[in-house]
């Protein structure tokens, strides 16, 4: 799509690109970052460390986004925290796991770039900015061959977002909240000149920049785009952040950027209803099962929570129950999000098979056959090897399948530069995290646990280094 003098506005969106060679802004910065999630804040921190002035725009009153809604777990291979535990891992092995889950369809250059950058990124955030990482060793998420999930002590996405925000504030990087970027201003050569952002009172603020990073996430909150690219989730619950409105896509398309992997997304087959919170998939990994309203299992729960979303929404009423027993319940007490959900009433206890059947509203005989249908350690009808049969008391959580965030977006190279339809980088535009294509290939089943935060943190780290190098050699004033 070409950009005309009057600009290009996307249907059902405030995003707009305008050609304005004489653009002047009262505020000027070297780098402007749109979005204050893990990607934008990581980039802001690294730019400050590299001596580059940056400003972060955030549409909400308080930075949160998809990061706060996540588990806060970041997969990385070769960090100091991982090495201290004696875990033998490498970027190459991590890359193999990513491609294994994506059936070889993830962008090779990005997989290599992210798996190589994420350990230095986490180590830097720890040594320079005080984020103390722990490695989860109690279980392996589906598709990971090593213990590589890194988390802060609080083990929540909110804690991760808050820690990054505190570090950004300590580094004196400005975060302009309640500033919704609506207009991208460029010259005739598609060089970004700045952005106009709308304030809650309707006023508009103009900010000029020499380089722009789009870290404003994907399009899961834009129904028209979901229907266009992932129609199978058009009627599913959206469990992500409303800021996923497709702004980056609209701007990119108007500039002639190429889009990639648009059918990829992270689903989640464990969205607790009616409470509206994610239920940790560790329940399934450690021996839990999903039961539909008929009292039957319907898939191999060990394959991953993303593709489980499709299996769950295909059940009667789009509803299933996560069923587990005391050993799994005890493990789950180590997850603050689970404890909070249990306090809210999302976790129900049933002291007998009959009580569990009454809770699910299914036939006790059918449920009994389901829970006795596998031999521990042997492949069941779905090919899963469950470690044991479940014993009373049982615990159950009513769930549906949800769309959490998209994994397709602006095509980027290994330096996170946005590419046009000819594969050439746009003059001074970068994208990472949910705004860009990820490393999940082109289908929901390609999502390896943690791919979202991997792309966000590694992408922000890479983008900051590349933008700093660009500014050192650029003659743009």
Image (cartoon, grey):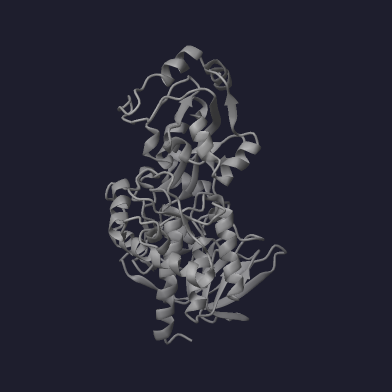
Is residue 72 found left or right of 301 in the rendered image? right
Counting from the top left corner in percent of width and height, residue 10 is at 51, 58
Q: Which residue is at 61% across, 39% downward?
A: 341
Q: Report x, y in % for residue 31.
A: 51, 76
Front residue (pair 217, 148): 148
Count numbered badges in the picture.
0
From this view, report whether residue 322 is shown above or below residue 147: above
**Residue visible at 38% across and 48% down?**
448
Q: Residue at x 55, y 31 (%)?
A: 397
Image x and y of residue 357, in percent: 54, 18
> Is residue 98 something one can see in this rendering?
yes
Q: Residue 411: give x, y in percent of width and height.
A: 37, 61
- Say which quarter of the image contains residue 393: top right
The N terminus - image quarter:
bottom left
Q: Quadrant of residue 306?
A: top left
Q: Nearer the viewer, residue 295 or 30?
A: 295
């Amino acid at each position: 799509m070409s950009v005309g003098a009057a600009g290009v506005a996307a249907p059902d969106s405030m995003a707009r690109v305008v050609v304005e060679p004489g653009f002047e802004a009262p505020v000027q910065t070297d780098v402007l970052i749109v979005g204050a999630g893990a990607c934008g804040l990581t980039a802001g921190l690294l730019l400050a460390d590299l001596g580059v002035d940056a400003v972060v725009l955030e549409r909400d009153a308080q930075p949160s986004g998809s990061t706060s809604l996540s588990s806060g777990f970041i997969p990385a291979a070769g960090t100091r925290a991982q090495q201290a535990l004696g875990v033998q891992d490498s970027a190459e092995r991590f890359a193999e796991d990513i491609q294994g889950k994506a059936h070889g369809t993830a962008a090779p250059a990005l997989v290599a770039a992210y798996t190589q950058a994420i350990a230095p990124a986490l180590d830097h955030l720890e040594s320079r900015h005080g984020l103390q990482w722990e490695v989860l060793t109690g279980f392996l998420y589906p598709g990971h061959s090593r213990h590589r999930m890194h988390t802060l002590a609080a083990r929540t996405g909110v804690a991760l977002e808050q820690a990054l925000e505190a570090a950004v504030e300590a580094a004196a990087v400005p975060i302009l909240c309640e500033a919704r970027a609506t207009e991208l201003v460029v010259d005739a050569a598609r060089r970004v000149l700045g952005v106009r952002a709308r304030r809650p009172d309707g006023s508009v603020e103009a900010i000029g920049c020499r380089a722009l990073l789009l870290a404003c996430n994907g399009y899961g909150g834009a129904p028209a785009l979901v229907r266009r690219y992932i129609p199978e989730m058009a009627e599913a619950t959206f469990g992500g952040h409303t800021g996923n409105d497709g702004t980056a896509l609209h701007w990119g398309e108007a500039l002639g950027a190429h889009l990639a992997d648009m059918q990829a997304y992270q689903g989640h087959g464990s969205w607790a209803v009616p409470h509206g919170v994610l239920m940790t998939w560790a329940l399934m990994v450690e021996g839990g099962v999903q039961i539909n309203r008929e009292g039957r299992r319907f898939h191999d729960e060990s394959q991953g929570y993303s593709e489980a979303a499709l299996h769950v929404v295909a059940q009667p009423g789009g509803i299933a129950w996560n069923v587990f027993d005391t050993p799994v319940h005890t493990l789950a007490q180590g997850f603050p999000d689970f404890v909070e959900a249990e306090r809210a009433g999302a976790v129900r206890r049933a002291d007998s098979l009959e009580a569990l059947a009454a809770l699910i509203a299914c036939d006790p005989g059918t449920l009994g056959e389901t829970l006795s249908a596998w031999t521990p350690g042997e492949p069941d009808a779905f090919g899963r090897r469950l470690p044991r049969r479940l014993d009373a008391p049982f615990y159950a959580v009513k769930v549906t399948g949800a769309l959490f965030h998209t994994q397709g977006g602006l095509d980027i190279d290994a330096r996170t530069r946005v590419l046009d339809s000819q594969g050439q980088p746009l003059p001074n535009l970068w994208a990472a995290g949910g705004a860009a294509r990820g490393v999940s290939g082109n289908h929901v089943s390609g999502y390896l646990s943690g791919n979202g935060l991997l792309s966000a943190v590694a992408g922000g780290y890479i983008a900051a280094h590349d933008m700093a190098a660009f500014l050192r050699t650029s003659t743009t004033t």
